[in-house]
Amino acid sequence: MTVTLELNGRRISADVSPSDTLKTTLKHLGVISVRDGCDGEGSCGLCAVILDGKLVNSCLVPAPQADGARVITLEHFSKDRKLGIVQRALVDASCVQCGYCTPAVVLAIHDLLERTKDPSADEVRDALSGTMCRCTGYEQFFAAVRIAAKRIADPDYTERLAPEFRPELRHVGKDREKIDAAALARGEKAFVEDRVERDACHLKMLGSPYAHAWIKSIDVELARAAPGVVAVLTYENCPDLVYTTAGQGFPEPSPHDQRMFSRKLRHVGDRVCAVLAESPEEAEAALALVKVEYEPLAPVLSIAEAKAEGAPVIHSGEVRYVVGEPPEGSSTKGDGRDDPIIYQFPLHADPHRNLAASAAAGIGDVEKGFAEADVVIERTYRGNRVQSTPLEPHVVYARIDGGRLILHASTQVPWHVRRVVSRVLGIAENKVRVVKERVGGGFGAKQDIVVEDVAGYLAWTTGRPVYFRYSREEEFIASRTRHAMEITVKLGAKRDGRLTAILMRLDADTGPYGQHCLTVPMNAISKSLPLLLCDNARFEVKSYYTNLSPAGAYQGYGAPKGSFALQTALAELASELGIDQLEMIEKNRVRSGARIEILRSLGEGREGQAVTLGECGLGEMIARGKKAFRWNEPKPESGDPDWKIGRGAVIIQQGSGLPGLDAANAEARLLADGTVILLSGGADLGTGLDTVTAKAVAETLGLDMEDVAVLSGDTDVTPFDKGAYASSGTFFSGNAALLAAQDLRRKIIAIASSVLGEPESNLSIVHRGLVKGRHGEISLAKLGHMATQGEGHGELSGQGSFKTDHAAFPYGAHFVEVAVNERTGEVKVRRYHAYQDCGTPINPALAKGQIFGGCLKAIGHSLYEELVYDEEGRCLNPRFLDYKVPSIYEVPEDFVVELVPVADEVGPFGGKSVSEISVNGAAPAIAIAIHDAVGAWCREWPFTPERVLRAMGRL
Amino acid sequence: MKFKEYLRPASIDEALAGKSLHADSAFLAGGTYILSDPGLSARRARATAEGGREVVAIDISRIVPRTVERRGRELFVGAGATFQDLLDAQAVITSVVDAAKSMANRNIRNRATVGGNIAARKSCASLIPILLVLGSRVEIAARPGEGLVSEPLSVWLDRPKGLIVDVIIPLETGRRSAFRRWGRTACDISILTAAVSYRLEGGAMRELRIAAGGLGPRARLFPEIERLFEGKPLPRRADAEAAIAPLLSPVDDLRGSAAFKRLRGAGLIADALAGAVEEP
Ligand SMILES: Cc1cc2nc3c(=O)[nH]c(=O)nc-3n(C[C@@H](O)[C@@H](O)[C@H](O)COP(=O)(O)OP(=O)(O)OC[C@H]3O[C@@H](n4cnc5c(N)ncnc54)[C@H](O)[C@@H]3O)c2cc1C
Ligand code: FES
Ligand code: FES
């Protein structure tokens, strides 16, 4: 049937089928700004349009119903290169992180401002209530609305959204526009889905219905013969090798234990069969024709089950070691049926007992420490699986060009993708190009090669372009989740609160495969233990295979769970001793000049070393929090007898990349007009990394931001970078860019010296793009132009390669005030203050946005989010209707981020990492505050009303 | 749900005719319930089990009234009114506003209709409990050419038929009412709902009505709880809770254990009893 609608002021007719939605119709019409985060469930709001003056989700509007309607999409506001008022305000208020939600946010705010000129905070919440954003924590949206509203009356209105730092620098420490924000706010083509061509084939995956099973037989003949089918792939015809999907540096500290398809299925959703077809419908139809006979096995659904004597064995193949010997007593002989498990080096594993990896070490003598203690407590803390829910799920577009494989990827690790995919395909790395497109949220889940291997293989073998995008359900059950963990903390202390011993025993559930199986749980230790100074400390980490959804990297890595356990235990001990919890922290925390001995045993892949800390900002951060929360005064009253107020505070830390292991590179090229192109290996996930690297160049070469263009994360074009993980962006990729700019500056000065006839020592580069000597001067444009000439000096380009042995620790103190309803167990976060040291804040408002986003995610994990499984290992809530991520209504009313910089000696301009650390505070701070309010300790997150009531003994 | 055909009847009679002509058909209003797509595995299971059963959609959005207006002591709500229409109308009393606000979020409220909310008959329906306790009636068109018949909502919910055209909410002088809900987050679907209404005469609750959702397959009136308190003075909240809880028999599911829902459901009803107000 035909529908006619007015789309952005233009009358358009479209042929639709009765089942089409307005969303699919708009997509067919070439409208790209209408996104999809929930597969048309209606819960994400990213497909929003304004339909006859109302903001609606276009996935819930039948196309025929839109006949005769007026439809407005973001494109309406992007008619020329200028940004509309709302778009500009969002850019100015640092609200465009990954930008995947931005079109919907623009429409929601327009809709609001049509209704009210001066919206209240509650009206802003209402307006954005249906729009999900996983990056920003929503807080800065309030400022964006305020700015937009003011600018309607006064177009020149501006306000400063973050303090400035480093007055002697031009760009660094000042807010500059995020360099990709305008394009994203305009809804330009930017994401993988925008690159897909009309002739693309569609890949659909049949996932295992069983958590643990063998495939007895699989018959794909009907599927292969079905209309539109291009290829069918199963364990029978896929490449025969095992690898790890972890996007880590090679050799990875993760076992190679996964085949592209295996006969053994190890979790619900595990790959059984892929169909590539001309259309998604044909691919789905063919999948329904695949006949599989399964031999179900008893599943392993918890850590306890995994380690039980006689537990079902999840990986029963032969265990091999590339380097080193199997641990003593471990079993290596395979069952002759299952795939092999190859460790690059020993990880103290015993896979046939479901032990994927383990580690134990420490300093001093904990037994002696406990013997000396006046009080000893031992508590166990649990954290279940959470998913990062990037609103753009895993997605890839693979195509062949000039005999090479091109992967348009939404990835954090372009080079690791290239390495792994080429190895799996058995082709040279120079046959593969990975182009990182804008990433609609990565958060760690996109550190793994989840879709690129199979899409790449099918593109390579069929020669057809392949589009593979996870459904939201697949994203929940078959991408990556945060490892579930059980952490037992034993603390001993003197009466005065000084710790005498710390013992952390951590069991992690790495799921069916071992990606990040050791590093995530180790990170729970290495980012929590060094916060406390104690002569006797020990940890024991074990990581078990289970048949639940795969675990992997997620912002914060293991740290949030380690932090939850250790910080809460410390507060429990304080309460036992009758000491204020902050005083307890104060007595034991790391401080300026402290020697952190425990780092000797926390080497992260190399020999560990004790570190003597320089300046530590924790004292200042705690002082600020205490003041803001009037810590020494009585708590405020809630005004309602049901609601009790409680407060909590914690200290947190993270790292900045992996010293000694990783490397980043960049190249800065001077063009003939004096502008610069920076080729950065860094993978910007919407975090603003490209803006950080651009700033490093502009600052160093006396340029304005618009004089620097950044091309990043393209394995053909830009130099190698380890990728965006382990909080390495600013520190590693930022430093590489800085080094490249400095190298270019050196070369410029050398040439200018010969042109001007002045010694190099007389020359410096000043704003804007001018080399100044005592007598003469020459512009970068002139030098750039000369380089292109016959008598020139060759192209001027600078290389930067960064690696380091130096560990830069960002620290933070988070303070929270909650209200807990004694009758219902509900918890409301009323105040949340994050005081954080990211070294020099390169771009303060963007840094704050990263922190707001991290904190709200962590509040979500602490209070609402959890993947729930039934007794067969099926995930019961792989959808937003039942996996509750915070909306704008969950944002604490008093949500504050303050940057407390302590410049790092190695970081670019003194910068350190900023984003990951911010997820480490909420769980322990909220648990402590709940106890402060109602006297009950919640030791398992999320702290749902039900768990709170149980902790209180009311249920 | 997938549509094999899409009808756009020009009148209510035409819609009813379409409905009787096509056995496999469904009225379509805001579409937020019918179109909301279940997850991938549910979709695949359905495609395999039913060979992708499809229905004929009968779009009633342009023929069912969507006005919200006060007529004397009655509030007329067109079944086609969206939740946002209800919130934007001046005429609506607080307890109904509270219930309407509890519907998901603005994007959904801009589409979801009052008629659709009733007809979907979900246990957690935002509006059904408050409509029930206010003694609402529905006006329905059952057969072409026969005009509208009116019946109590409670009756219709037990035996749904025809097309809901209007909902009539009596606004009795002296009747107090309140709505309470619990969801995991602010914009969550309501997991548990409760609504009450009564008159307070000489310190005693009279003509008490209590309805709740999320505690069984459908939202409904709970006469067994009403009987506990009818004619009695307003109980202390804790006493009410303790008395109500044993009468509730919710089931365990991923949204909460039975024990929790019992406690919480009783709490909501007790809160509603305590918080009921009258509005002019
Ligand atoms: C993200 C999301 C969140 C939600 N949250 C909530 C919530 O918080 N609370 C809640 O109650 N619901 C919620 N829902 C369900 C919501 O879709 C319905 O409650 C809504 O009111 C249905 O209205 P509709 O107009 O969209 O109905 P439709 O989807 O068009 O129809 C719903 C049903 O009613 C029938 N129908 C529609 N109109 C009539 C009529 N006039 N006469 C007879 N039959 C009719 C249809 O045939 C269909 O069976 C949510 C849905 C989504 C997608
Ligand atoms: S895709 Fe429409 S609401 Fe998520
Ligand atoms: S910026 Fe909102 S989802 Fe990424």
Image (cartoon, coloured by chain):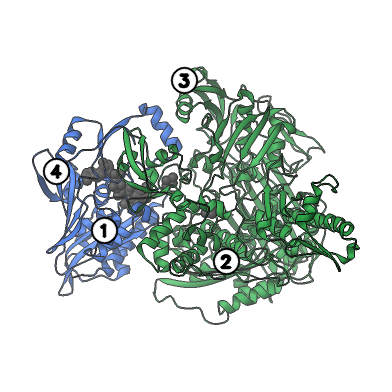
Chain colours: A green, B blue
Q: Circle 4: is it few (<14), some (14-19), or many (20+) Cα within 10 Å?
A: many
Q: Amino acid at mark 3?
A: Pro
Closest to the observer, A245 or B59: B59
Please give the chain letter of the residue carrying mark 1. B
Mark nearer the N terminus (4 vs 1): 1
Is the CB of mark 2 within 8 Å of ligand 3? Answer: no
Q: Residue furthest bottom?
A: A633
Q: Is residue A387 left or right of residue A378?
A: left
Instruction: Work out how far the residue at label 3 is from the one at label 4, CA to CA, in angstroms.
Output: 46 Å
Marks 3 and 4 on same chain: no
Residue carrying label 4: B141
The lab-note entry on whether marks 2 and 3 share a chain reads: yes
Task: Tell me the element at label 3.
Answer: loop
Q: CA distance from mark 4 to mark 1?
A: 22 Å
Badge 2 is on which residue? A925
Give the distance between the C-alpha atoms of the residues marked 2 and 3, in whole angstroms. Answer: 57 Å
Residues beneath discs 1 and 2 located on the same chain? no
Give me the C-alpha separation between circle 3 and circle 1. 49 Å
Amino acid type, residue under disc 1 in the picture? Leu
The residue nearer to you, when weighing A735 against A865, is A735
Whether discs 4 and 1 lie on one chain: the answer is yes
Where does the image place residue A21, in percent across and percent down from the top left? 37, 39
Amino acid type shown at disc 2: Ala
